[in-house]
Amino acid sequence: MSIDGFDGQLRDLALEAARQASALIRERRTHDVTVADTKTSDVDVVTQPDRESEALIRSIITSRRPDDEVLGEEEGTTSGSSGVRWVVDPIDGTVNYLYGLPEYSVSIAAEVDGSVVAGVVVNAATGVEYVATEGDARRDGVPLSCRGPAPLHRRLVITGFSYEAGKRVVQAQAVARLLPDVRDIRRLGSCALDLCHLAEGTADAYVEEGVQLWDYAAGAFIARQAGVRTEMHPGRYGTPALVAAPEHGFDEFLAAVTDAGFLSTGVALESGPDAP
């Protein structure tokens, strides 16, 4: 079996699981959605459908590949022996989901020996599917490519904010400094979809401190296959920050977000199995 064939099998399994999980959380959204728990602060919420979605994804994956490791946002890590690890965000954009804003997703990445080889992000509200294997990124079956070159002042930037008050102050100050230098800044609420917007060319760049592996593993992989460069850098608040932009404009954007105060240094963190 070729490596490409194996990657394709992992992609197809991820897509099957993401489609079923998306259908589940859409159905749950027709009823009242309430907060089941909180995490980093009382506004960083978990809903019961978050837990149900992850349980469903895990059951689909482990029924086909019982020896694989699974890392999920809600249930943590279950060990495996195959060299394959699945990185799962059962609802990326939970606050959007809670409020009924149609920008929340199911995100699943498949790693082999520490490197992502397949990624799937499904906008659960709209059904739009972003899927990638090495060298091939698609939206609903149509090949993706990032936007072409543009001066910094004509770039649309996506960012996100922590749920921790102190970190939000730092991020807000950085946004205020960057805003005069770019076309505009958006905060959409799902890291996975933000990165897919870069892949499809509906935004020019992205920066956010404090994202977790399950937030970006699939989306960053999809974006890279569409010509986007992604790097982790030390954030100004002291936690890693993800920076993403098309290769042709990355260095200028990195300098801009460093100067604005999103980052403590423009030097990338060491790469590793959890790096984008």
Image (cartoon, grey):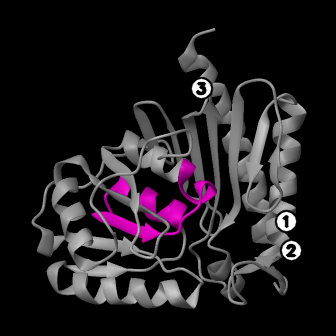
In the rendered image, residue 90, in percent from the top left (x then y), is placed at 73, 60
Query: For the residue marked with disc 2, what is the amino acid?
Result: Gln
Q: Residue at left 41%, top 85%? A: 170
In the image, is 21 to the left or to the right of 44?
right
Query: For the residue marked with disc 3, what is the amino acid?
Result: Asp
Which circle marks residue 7 in the picture?
3
Few, some or many residues within 10 Å of mark 2 (<14, 14–19, 20+): some
- Quarter of the image where one finds residue 43: bottom right
Q: Is residue 166 above or below residue 252?
A: below
Q: Secondary structure at mark 2?
A: helix
Question: Is residue 215 covered in magenta?
Answer: yes
Q: Circle 1 sits on which residue?
A: 51
Q: Magenta residues, as a range?
A: 191-217
Q: Secondary structure at mark 3?
A: helix
- Quarter of the image where one finds residue 100: bottom right
In the image, is 12 to the left or to the right of 187?
right
Which circle marks residue 263 in the picture?
none
